[in-house]
Amino acid sequence: MKIFICEQDPYRAKLIQDILGVYNYKLITVNSQSDLFRQAYHQKPSVIVINELFPKKSATDMLSKLRDDPVTSKIPVIFIGTELYSEMKDKPAYMFDNLTEFLQEPIKIKNLRHYIDRWTTLRSLYIKH
C-alpha cells in the first residue's frame, strides 16, 4: 500500500517515514503541491498524509482541490497540524466528507497507525458505495 507523505521539511518527513516504516507501507515523500497531483496520477496512493504547512494557500482550498479532481476524489486524506485542527474541529461535520481526518500535533504513533489502517485494511467498513 502506498502512503504519500506531503511534507516540505525533510526532517519531519523522515520522522513520519521512520514511524510508519516499520509497518511495511510503501512510503513516498512529496515535496510540493504540483508534485502531489502529478505523482497521484501515476502511482494512485492508498492514503495521503498532509502537514498543515504543505498547502501553498489554505488547507481548505487544498482539500477542495483534492476532492474536485477525479483521480484524488476517493483517496483518504489525513491532515496533521495544530492550527488546522483547532480551526476544523469547530466546523460542522457536514462540511467535510468521510474521507478526511484531522490529527492534532504532536501526533501519537498509535493514532496515526489507526487512521492509516482504517483507510487501508478496514476501508470497506467506512466507505459507503
Image (cartoon, rainbow, N blue to C red):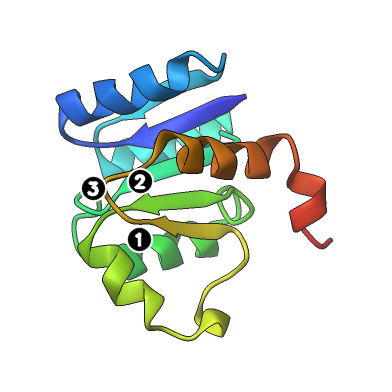
Residue 31 — which label? none
For label 2, the crowd category at 10 Å Cα-Cα, with few meaning under 14, some 14 to 19 and many 20 or more, is many
Discs 1, 2 touching: Cβ within 8 Å: yes
Question: Which residue is painted at 42% across and 42% down in the image?
Answer: 49
Discs 1, 3 touching: Cβ within 8 Å: yes
- Give the percent coordinates (x, y) of residue 91: 41, 83
Considering only order in the chain, which callout, 3 or 1, is on the residue closer to the N terminus?
Answer: 3
Q: Where does label 2 land, which residue?
A: 50
- Give the percent coordinates (x, y) of residue 77: 49, 51
SS type, badge 1: helix
- Image quadrant holding the N terminus, namely top right
**Nearest to viewer (mark 1 / mark 2):** 2
Mark 3 vs mark 2, CA separation in Å: 7 Å
Side of 51 relative to 113 (left or right)? left
Q: Where does label 3 land, which residue?
A: 54
Whether residue 58 appears in this view of the structure is no
Q: Where does label 1 land, which residue?
A: 62
Relative to 51, does residue 45 appear above or below in the rendering?
Answer: above
Discs 3, 2 touching: Cβ within 8 Å: yes
Question: Which residue is painted at 34% across and 43% down in the image?
Answer: 107
Mark 1 vs mark 3, CA separation in Å: 9 Å
Residue type at mark 2: give it. Ile
Question: Which residue is painted at 28% across and 71% down in the image?
Answer: 86
